[in-house]
Image: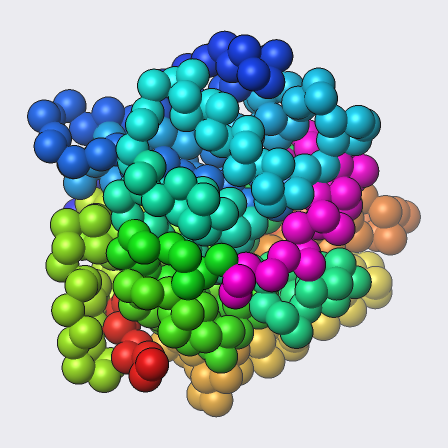
Amino acid sequence: MPLLSSLRPAGPAPRHVWTEVPVLGARVHARTWHAGTARDRPPVVLLHGLGLSSRYLVPLGRRLAALGHDVVSPDLPGFGRSPRDPRLRWPGGPDVATQTGQLLAWLDAYGMPRASYFGNSIGAQVAVELAARHPERVERLVLSGSTPDPRYRRPWKQYPQVLRNMVFEVPGLQPVLQSEYLSTGVARMVQQLVRSSDDPIEQRLPDVVAPTLVVRGRHDRTLSQEWAEEVTRLLPDGRLVVIEGAAHNAHWSAPDVSARLVSAFLAGEVDAPGPAGHDVVPRSAPGDPLAAARPLPARAHAALDVLTTVALVTVPWTRPWGPRTRVLLSASGVMGLADTLLTDHPAGLLRVLPLPVHLNLEAMAGLQLLTAAATWLRGEPAAGRWVTAGQGVHELLRAGTAFVPAGPARLVPVPR
């Protein structure tokens, strides 16, 4: 597929809709996607996680619409573009029950009596609360990165797991998360984390009668495999799927696999138990119209890694760029070589590092080189500083455009 076509967004752009919610005394913002075809099944509602909004659910919403689903994703009060609930004292970080009440008020004002729900992280907790309290309003349920694991039910235990997830997410997600957190504010995020981390979700799971799909990214550090299986076991009508190569935010890092998985489940195609290790959705591939717009294939990325390493280790010592510049660039090349040999891609030998970790290390190296060019290398020849800055940009571009194959999505039988 030509490069330009691979850069086109999959699915329609979202419409921004504001709904007056009298019960909350505020307007609630939502992003919507319409498939443009008549559907006889309820729409899909996407629920965001801690400190986030519908913005980071856009890749999934677009692809579900491309697959023929009507999709709505609200910014719950106090997050994204929606003002906080005036009934809550500052900073207004809600607990799960409060967010569920806010969701219900918005659903009534929006005019949506019944829908299927996709919840990520805390959004999964809200979805479970809604399904347990109001089963008549829930058609089907998808719990992606469901929390909280009983081992991490204190904020000081859960948040380190959130940070550990960061290195397994694709680099493009990081600026989105950080801008969302900045918009939400630290105080509201902390209060929400405190109020939602100690949530005995296992007490409500047996009351969820809707067919439910539990989704775990293989590298998710917030949702352990043991807890994912226990969540599935407690659900009266649950099944578990693991997406290889993905982490906590599989809907972003593997949007094509996630969208096809959700669509198949909503169509009832994942209801049968299936054999152990059965692939529900195949591995993502370059050229797929639903794949993320990252046009640099794994082989090309690996080749660039090798060429860049060779250049960094050799060229600086042949140029009059100054001693600190030469040492910095050579050290960057040596570290890049070690990283490349350890990565699970065509140039790797040991292949113990998942590709997203490698890309995050590249992005970090790029930022460090840009910072060094502007600070530590002052007084060194200008040519060397410009080369260092250019190498930093090159690292960032390599990390941001590399295609990250994810999947397959595998059904995991859970004995009851």
Rendered residue at 21%/49% (across/down): 266
Could you say which is closer to the camera, residue 5 or residue 389?
5
> Residue 280: x, y in percent?
20, 67
Task: State the residue at coordinates (26%, 73%).
Answer: 411
Magenta stretch contains residue 326: no
Q: Would you say 315 lies left or right of 230 here?
A: right
Q: Relative to 293, say whether 231 is above or below.
A: below
Answer whether residue 192 is magenta in the image.
yes
Whether residue 304 is visible? no
In this view, the residue in front, 397 or 126, is 126
* Main SS category, magenta section: helix
| In front of the other: 113 or 356 | 113
- In this picture, which residue range is highlighted in magenta? 180-203
Residue 191 figure quarter: top right
Quarter of the figure with residue 17? top left
Q: In this view, does 402 lie to the left or right of 359?
A: left
- Residue 105 visible? The answer is yes
User: In the image, what residue occupies the spot 73% across and 55% down?
Assistant: 368
Residue 408 vertical placement versus 22 (above, below): below
Residue 83: image location, x then y, percent: 64, 19
Determine whether 234 is above or below 18 in the image: below
Quadrant where the C terminus is found in the figure: bottom left
Q: In this view, does 333 lie to the left or right of 368?
A: left
